[in-house]
Image (cartoon, rainbow, N blue to C red):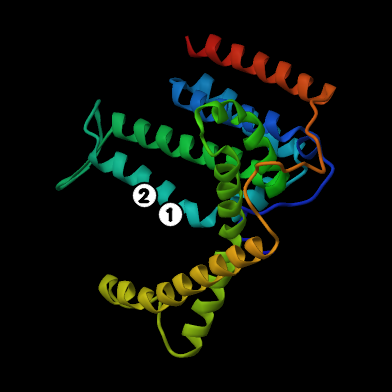
Amino acid sequence: MKSWLVIGQYVPGNSILHRLDPRTKLLLIFSYVIIVFFANNPASYAVLTFFAIGAIFLSKLSISYILKGITPIWFFIIFSFLIHLFFTRDGEVLWQFQQITIYYGGLIQGLTISLRFLLLIMVTSLLTLTTSPMEITDALENLLAPLQKWKVPVHELALMLSISLRFIPTLMDELDKISKAQASRGVDLKTGSLKSRIYAVVPLLVPLFISAFRRAEDLAMAMEARGYRGGEGRTKLRQLKYTMLDYQAAIIYLVIIIIFFYLRN
């Protein structure tokens, strides 16, 4: 397993988060993603950060492991911060040098947007780290089951999403192998102008796409050979059941949300 990538990975364990019903985790994380955008002051962001750190603690995974694992995302977090810092013109001027001016509103906006992004990535990464792809598929199919009345292919949508999550670390491993193979052939990806770096990426993308299409074709042939015909008439080996742990987690989460909205107002 690559220690520098956690998105799409599953780490087996027996923590509280591992033992929660996958439907509970999906509902809590989905509501958390929405609530993050309602934070409007340091106290409300502190509650959200406390929830994220607490969830990581309950998963028995180290924060450093998760922060290292989202290394590819740090570029977008820092880029988002810099965009708001230099281009948001609101509030009093904090620093000015020639044509560069930093405003207080830009600093606050950059910090809040970056913190939101970081919290979302950390919490959503916990879903795949503590839940197997099969459990995610079963939970999504169960939660979206009412849509079947309107002829929505719920089983196929859940399967597509779980396969996509499963292939993220696989493709990243493939990209790492291709980049090392290209570097051994003299392709320089770390130095030179921006234009030369962009051209150097092409030898990586072409074999990566070919490998992805080949894997998808092999998977489709394997599913067809095993008689896969969608979710119709299929039975499940593991039945999802809510336990007392799920109800306790829901009550604690509800209390945290009440505190969040109280501090927000």
Residue 51 lies, in percent from the top left, at 64, 28
For the residues labelled 2 and 1, the Cα–Cα distance comes to 6 Å
Camera-nearest residue between 87 and 23: 23
The picture quadrant where one finds residue 126 is top right
Measured along the vertical axis of the image, is residue 36 above or below residue 64? above
Relative image position of residue 34 (x, y in whole percent)? 49, 26
Name, please, the residue furthest toward the bottom. Answer: 185
Question: In what element is the residue under mark 2?
Answer: helix
- Name the kind of residue labelled 1 in the image: Phe
Tell me residue 198's x, y (percent).
31, 71
Along the viewing direction, whichever of 213 and 131 lies nearer the viewer: 213
Q: Give left or right: position of 13 versus 155.
A: right
10 Å crowding of disc 1: few (<14), some (14-19), many (20+)? few
The answer to whether residue 214 is seen in the rendering is: yes
In this picture, is 55 found above or below 11? above
- Which residue is at a point 60% across and 13% down the rendered structure image? 259
- Name the one closer to the observer, 75 or 178: 178
Helix, strand or loop under label 1:
helix
Crowding at dot 2, Cα within 10 Å, few <14 / some 14-19 / many 20+, comes out as: some
Where residue 132 appears, as percent x and y from the top left, is 72, 48
Question: What residue is at 55 percent from the left and 26 percent from the top?
Answer: 149
Q: Is residue 247 left or right of residue 154?
A: right
Residue 256 vertical position relative to residue 109 in the rendered view, above or below: above
Q: Residue 143's quadrant in the figure?
A: top right
* Three-letter amino acid code at the position of disc 2: Phe
The residue drawn where x is 63% and y is 49% is 66
* Residue matched to label 2: 79
User: Which label belongs to residue 75?
Assistant: 1
Q: Nearer the viewer, residue 216 or 152?
A: 152
Locate the N terminus and report the quarter of the image it occupies: bottom right
Residues marked 2 and 1 touching at CB (< 8 Å): yes
